[in-house]
Image: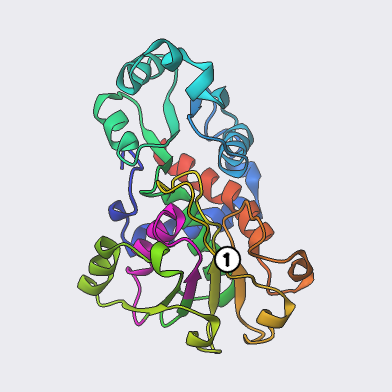
Amino acid sequence: MKHIISCDQFKREDLENLFQLTDAMRGDLSHYKTGLADRIVATLFYEPSTRTRLSFEAAVLRLGGEIISTENAKEMSSTVKGESLEDTVRVIHGYSDALVLRHPDRNAAEEAAQVSEVPVINAGSGSGEHPTQALLDMYTIFKHHGTLDGLSVAVMGDLFYGRTIHSLLKLLALYRKVTVFGLSREELSLPDEYKRYLEERNLQYVSCRNFDDLPREVDVIYHTRTQTERNLNAGMEVEEFIIDDFVMDRFPQNAILMHPLPRNREIAREVDSDPRAKYFEQSRNGMYIRMGLLYQLFR
């Protein structure tokens, strides 16, 4: 697997192998700390990022590699002079052994891969996909529940523009007897293309409009913020689904609450002390999963 562009590339076996490697790295990093020795990874981010960029860079450094980085390529690269993404990639692949790319256009990672001589990793492409986020999300669920088969998962918030949701659903579709409940306002419902994707793979999807539509016995609650930066109707105000202690009382003690972060007001701060709140653990898992992915990429 030269490039990591979409979750469509992954099979169930790929995820299980990656999880096993990630666990091994967490258990004893000494066997892997030179895995990227003499490798240079470029991180090219046209959109803001905290967790994705820094966890990728930390992963490279922990494996003995080096980083070259542009954290605001939209304003701090030759893009401001009119250089195309393809030309930028053609230049950077001459400096590095892999390129981690975040871009506001949903096809940017695929376009970069077509001209790059080194692996391109999609670190978020507009409202399309965010495959490495989905990998760490699946790993977090697996670590808690011990399986990914037979789960009921509630995804909520911005299902229309939320690329983390789009990628997560594609990976959940690799597993058996998974049911997904999608809670959103009508204007931010899951796009039909993803509903068809799930239907074709026999994953049950149920649209919901309020908390009462969700079953109380769910295994995973996955919230997202409204992607205001992608909303073409900038004046539209969307009422948020707020999770607080009262809402959490609806769900079982073995459920987990996840969020790709950053959060705004959709999860109250009071929930942070709930042992079911896993979003900061989820974020930490991102570094380890990306370590495993990078290690595999260069083997």
Percent across and percent down for residue 298 are: 41, 35
What's the magenta region? 154-177
Quick one: SS at disc 1?
loop
As drawn, 26 above or below 154: above
Kind of residue indicated by mark 1: Glu
Q: Any magenta on residue 175?
A: yes
The residue where tag 1 is placed is 240
Q: Residue at x 45, y 15 (%)?
A: 80
Assess whether residue 206 is covered by the magenta stretch: no
**Colour style of the rendered protein structure:** rainbow
From the image, which quarter does the N terminus lie in? top left
User: How many numbered marks are there?
Assistant: 1
Name the spot of residue 135 as percent of width and height, x first: 46, 56
- As drawn, the residue found furthest toward the top would be 81
Residue 15 percent location from the top left of the image: 41, 59
Identified at 63% across, 53% down, the residue is 283
Residue 215 in sight from this viewpoint: yes
Q: Is residue 155 above or below residue 32?
A: below
Residue 110 sits above or below residue 205 on the image: above
Q: Residues within 10 Å of mark 1 (few under 14, many from 20)?
A: some
Please identify the quarter of the rendering in which residue 56 is found. Answer: top right
Residue 95, compared with residue 284, is above or below; it is above
Relative to 250, 149 lies left or right = left
Specify the quadrant of the image occupied by residue 256: bottom right
> Which of the 4 image quadrants contains residue 76?
top right
